[in-house]
């Protein structure tokens, strides 16, 4: 897994999901974390890992090939009212407290932090926003790769960056848990919504077992143990989703490609 719904420091939530799956499936489920999207993607392609919580952009890139290496399993619906009961999420545009910026357009010339290039909320969505604004020839004063949404928030809070675009799920989680760095930044704009990070299966995984995993997750909100785990991550339930749920991410990626604007600047 990558830190798709909770920050790196709270990956125990995913460990609990792995243990829940193990109990319901009656077979061992090993939990692996702390890896970049790129590394996770390579492991999925090779079949080294069979299931992964993945950002929507890597999912789209792996699906839109002559030989897709992943298939959809399930996606979460978050408890927050702003998610509208749909498997969607946002990219929050944040700035450090005291900065006068009120919208994305006000970030011109500032120091911008992003988690990594394969992130939808941290890179694909702000890049699409720049294409929409016609700002493809140099907009930010400088950019820095933070390595995670959690670190992007921390860098903005500490004044090491002026602004960032971060996963709304991670930000909401930190806000709900009272993380101090969240109080030192402001959300000035919300980009999206877009298809939420999801659970995918490697095409190396047996289809029957993939269906069993999906069935377990879709019923997770129906027993006490499952509901407790979901509540820890502020997830209402898991739902089955179609590829069309990620068409918004696909459009943003295609817009950047068509504009010849793949690197944020």
Image (cartoon, rainbow, N blue to C red):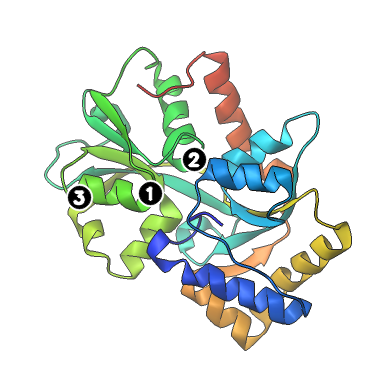
**Position of residue 19 measured from the top left corner of the image (x, y, whole percent):** 62, 77
Residues at marks 3 and 1 touching, judged by CB atoms closer than 8 Å: no
Residue identified by numbered label 1: 149
Secondary element type, mark 1: helix
Number of numbered labels in the structure image: 3
For the point 70% across and 82% down, the residue is 23
- Residue 210 versus residue 116 in the image, above or below: below
Q: CA distance from mark 1 to mark 2?
A: 9 Å
Q: Of the two numbered discs 3 and 1 on the same chain, state the one appearing first in sequence.
A: 1
Disc with the residue nearer the chain's start (2 vs 3): 2
Tag 1–tag 2 contact (CB < 8 Å): yes
Q: Position of residue 89 (x, y in %)?
A: 51, 51
Instruction: Count neighbours of disc 1 (C-alpha within 10 A) and say few if under 14, some if 14 to 19, many if 20 or more.
Output: many
Quadrant of image for the N terminus = bottom right
Q: Residue at x 43, y 22 (%)?
A: 263
User: In the image, residue 131 lies at what x, y percent?
Assistant: 45, 20
Query: How far apart are labels 2 and 3 at the CA level?
Result: 21 Å
Badge 2 is on which residue? 119
* Tag 3 residue: 157
In which image quadrant can residue 126 be found?
top left
């Amino acid at each position: 897994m990558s830190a798709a719904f909770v920050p790196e420091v709270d990956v125990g939530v995913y460990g609990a999901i792995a243990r829940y799956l193990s109990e319901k499936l009656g077979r061992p489920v090993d939990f692996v974390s702390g890896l970049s999207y790129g590394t996770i993607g390579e492991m999925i392609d090779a079949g080294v890992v069979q299931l992964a919580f993945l950002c929507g952009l890597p999912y789209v890139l792996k699906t839109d090939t002559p030989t897709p290496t992943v298939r959809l399993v399930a996606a979460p619906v978050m408890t927050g009212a702003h998610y509208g009961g749909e498997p969607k999420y946002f990219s929050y545009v944040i700035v450090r407290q005291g900065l006068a910026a009120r919208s994305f357009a006000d970030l011109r010339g500032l120091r911008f932090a992003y988690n990594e290039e394969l992130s939808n909320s941290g890179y694909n969505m702000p890049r699409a926003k720049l294409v929409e604004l016609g700002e493809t020839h140099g907009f930010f004063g400088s950019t820095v790769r933070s390595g995670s949404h959690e670190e992007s928030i921390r860098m903005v809070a500490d004044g090491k960056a002026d602004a960032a675009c971060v996963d709304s799920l991670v930000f909401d989680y930190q806000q709900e848990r009272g993380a101090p760095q969240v109080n030192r930044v402001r959300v000035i704009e919300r980009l999206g919504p877009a298809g939420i990070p999801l659970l995918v299966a490697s095409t190396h995984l047996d289809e029957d077992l993939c269906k069993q995993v999906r069935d377990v997750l879709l019923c997770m909100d129906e027993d006490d143990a499952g509901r407790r785990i979901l509540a820890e991550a502020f997830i209402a339930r898991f739902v089955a989703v179609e590829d069309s749920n990620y068409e918004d991410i696909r459009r943003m990626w295609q817009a950047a490609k068509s504009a010849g604007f793949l690197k944020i600047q």
